[in-house]
Amino acid sequence: MMNAIIAGQDEAVYRSAGQAPSVRWALATLSLAILLSSLGTSIANVALPNFAEAFNASFQEVQWIVLAYLLAITTTIVSVGRLGDITGRKRLLFAGIFLFTLASSVCGVAPTLWLLIAARALQGLGAAIMMALTMALVGETVPKAKTGSAIGLLGTMSAIGTALGPSLGGILIAELGWRVIFLINLPLGVLALFLAHRYLPNDRKRLKAERPGFDSLGTLLLALTLAAYALAMTTGRGSFGPFNVALLLASVLGAGLFVLAEKRAASPLIRLAMFRNLVLSSSLATSMLVSTVMMATLVVGPFYLSRTLGLDAALVGLVLSVGPLVAALTAVPAGRIADRFGPQRMTTIGLFGMAAGAFTLSMLPTIFGLPGYIAPIVVITSSYALFQTANNTNVMTDVRPDLRGATSGMLNLSRNLGLITGASVMGAVFALASATTDITTASPEAVASGMRITFSVAAALLVVALAIAAGAYRRTLRDQKLVP
């Protein structure tokens, strides 16, 4: 099925590559890797009640099954991207798929909750490797002129995995039990390993003198800093107490120490000079803001649909699947558009569409009910697919080959930090705007008010992102005119 999707949606990529069959199968490999990592992100959420029952645990304890996966990705994705630049991307991607598959098997047979959580952390590490290196490997598999189409294809597979997770997980749990949601990764992982070994381009052999060292101190400081930030944003059951403040201050201190370490490192994990590149800096900033807003749709949407519109759980799930489905259908065309009209211009247009969608989402549902909710969501998610594909293409097209892994890792990191920030900050905005201590028992009117204010704030954040992107675009055009 995946090969049919690739063949049907993006045949132009392969025809122009010169080696159509090998390129097609290489992209099939990368697509399967990104599908597995995104499926791992969403498939476990639906099983939280089953985990609580199976292990006789509280909801807060079983939440760590999801949190461990997210934390592992967030804290390691830049490091593994850089490691791929040093050791070879094919070799490390193969190791990542193997680790993901092995950890999935441990998850499926785990006899205790804490072994399951530990295995999920290892699974997240494997997913981080797959996420960071799939985009980096695009530059080695397709021509530069078709980078947008290929990245759009990966965006499609990511959206399919995200959308498929809850529904596939629910069916598997109902028929075969919760362990199967992890064990299903075994045949898929074995297939991905075979395809990676057979079809991905071999790593270029380097002399020892050419191999840069690995920044161990920088890696450790970055991981601890990101872990402190992620924990500060996710612990406390929605409240921001002294422990959260301490973790946030620790992350600020860690960021300062990381910058000092990178300035002194012979082979830094992140070259700070990269941030002088206006395209990269603006892309990372806008990606984080956009992901913050996208998380708001996942935080606020279920409460609004159930509490205010009165939909049952099945209909809520169906409506929530509209966004990922639209993103999946839009990503490949968005890649072609970015290739044709330029990624920087399409990034700005995508942000404009998202801002317009968020603004209308703050008003239309009150007037038109469910259709007034779905229509803006379609605008937001289709514009998001255009932004994400164009933004990634804009960064990855001209990046130096030896920095592709680290750059891809930073793009994924900015997205994950935005998701974590959105879950906490936008969730807090929603709770405050609803003027209630327990959102699960809030009145329909309070939830509607909270939604209006939350997406007004979301629209304002997207206007900021739009200003950043537009400013970078104008600066780039001005610089191009100055250079003959």
Image (cartoon, helix red, strand yellow):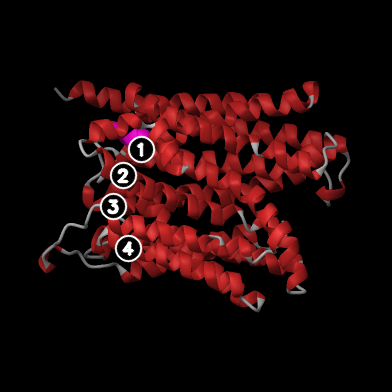
Label pair 1/4, CB-CB below 8 angstroms: no
Amino acid type of the residue tagged 3 in the rendering: Tyr
Report the span colored magenta: 146-150
Residue 229: percent from left, percent from top: 54, 60
Q: Give the distance between the C-alpha atoms of the residues marked 3 and 4, in whole angstroms.
A: 15 Å
Neighbourhood count class around disc 2 (C-alpha, 10 Å): few under 14, some 14–19, many 20 upward: many
Mark with earlier residue (1, 4): 4
Q: Give the distance between the C-alpha atoms of the residues marked 1 and 3, in whole angstroms.
A: 16 Å
Label 4 element class? helix
Please name the residue that numbered disc 4 is placed on. 92
Amino acid type of the residue tagged 2 in the rendering: Val
| Quadrant housing residue 69 | bottom right
Neighbourhood count class around disc 1 (C-alpha, 10 Å): few under 14, some 14–19, many 20 upward: many
Label 3 element class? helix
Neighbourhood count class around disc 3 (C-alpha, 10 Å): few under 14, some 14–19, many 20 upward: some
Please name the residue that numbered disc 1 is placed on. 150
Residue found at x 55% / y 57%: 40
| Tag of residue 96 | none
| Quadrant housing residue 449 | top right
Q: Which residue is at the front of the view, 482 or 120?
A: 120
Per the picture, the main secondary structure of the magenta-coloured stretch is: helix
Please name the residue that numbered disc 2 is placed on. 138
Residue 368: percent from left, percent from top: 78, 21
Q: Give the distance between the C-alpha atoms of the residues marked 4 and 2, in whole angstroms.
A: 15 Å
Mark with earlier residue (2, 1): 2
Q: Give the distance between the C-alpha atoms of the residues marked 2 and 3, in whole angstroms.
A: 13 Å
Label pair 2/3, CB-CB below 8 angstroms: no
